[in-house]
Image (cartoon, grey):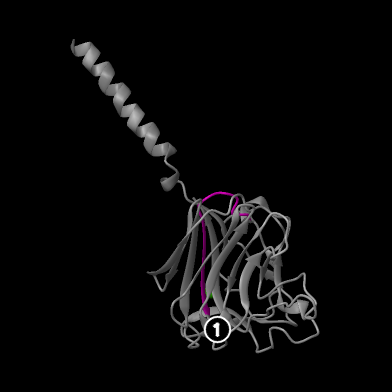
Amino acid sequence: MRRTAHYLSVIVTSGVLAALCASPASAATMEATYDMNEPSGATVMVDSSGNGLNGTINQAGLDTGVTFNGATGYEWAFRSPTAPPASPERVIQVPDNPNLDPRNDTWTVELRYRTKYKFGNITQKGQSATKGGQFKIQNPGGMPSCLFKGPSGQVATRSKVALNDNAWHTLKCVKTPTRVTMYVDGAFMSLKNGSTGVIDNKIPLTIGGKINCDQVKVTCDYFSGMIDYLTFTRG
Ligand SMILES: [Ca+2]
């Protein structure tokens, strides 16, 4: 009897441990971390996550090593988001990588930014007509939104308040298989229920605007302001 009870105890214990280890909620993985602390003149946006998903910076389009209120980040000088010609030098690109596609996973984009303007795409991977879908963090009216689009549809949620007061704000967009939730400065802001299906495209990750655009048929939606950091997490 005692022996049987001992065996049962071992089985139950290892079963609980296996369940804990297999729980998706406990398995968040940092896919890319951009601290954006590079000095003035930098040409590489370093991914400090260990995955090596570095980006390319063109100093003709933005400034690195800029400090504001205790933080170091990148700064994009004012530019109309939609006036021709296109200014691709403003857009940081990270080559397509499976780690940067949300797929159908729980997927979190977090960034800290500041702007006094009412426009601009802060970061995205894919555009509205992209095969495989897209995600996009944009700033229409100074009230940012988190947009995810896939084969099953588009799910987006937007800040209820304007954040374009030129002060730092953190923005977190969490996509799960059934909803998108936004947090601003650490507090819940809004959510939208819905499913996008698998988001997985071949387009580079971009920061500061679009790349497949001409300011005539497709606007580039350039961002003006600063970004302190940007991270992507799966799970
Ligand atoms: Ca920073």
Kindly state the secondary structure of the residue where label 1 is placed. helix
Q: Which residues are magenta?
A: 101-113
Mark 1 burial class by Cα count in 10 Å: few <14, some 14-19, many 20+: some
**Left or right: 26, with 60 as reference point:** left
Ligand 1 within 8 Å of the CB at mark 1: no
Q: Nearer the viewer, residue 162 or 122?
A: 162
Q: Nearer the viewer, residue 25 or 175?
A: 175
In this rendering, the answer to whether 72 lies above or below 46 is below
How many numbered circles does the render carry? 1
Residue 70 placed where, x, y %? 46, 82
Q: Which residue is mark 1?
A: 141
For the point 77% across and 69% down, which residue is it? 212
Amino acid type of disc 1? Gly
Q: Nearer the viewer, residue 41 or 85?
A: 85
List the single residue furthest toward the top: 1
For the point 45% across and 44% down, which residue is it? 24
In this rendering, the answer to whether 31 lies above or below 137 is above
Residue 65 placed where, x, y %? 60, 80
Residue 119 placed where, x, y %? 60, 82
Asked whether residue 27 is drawn in magenta, I would say no
Quadrant placement of the N terminus: top left
Residue 170 placed where, x, y %? 46, 73
**Left or right: 15, with 124 as reference point:** left
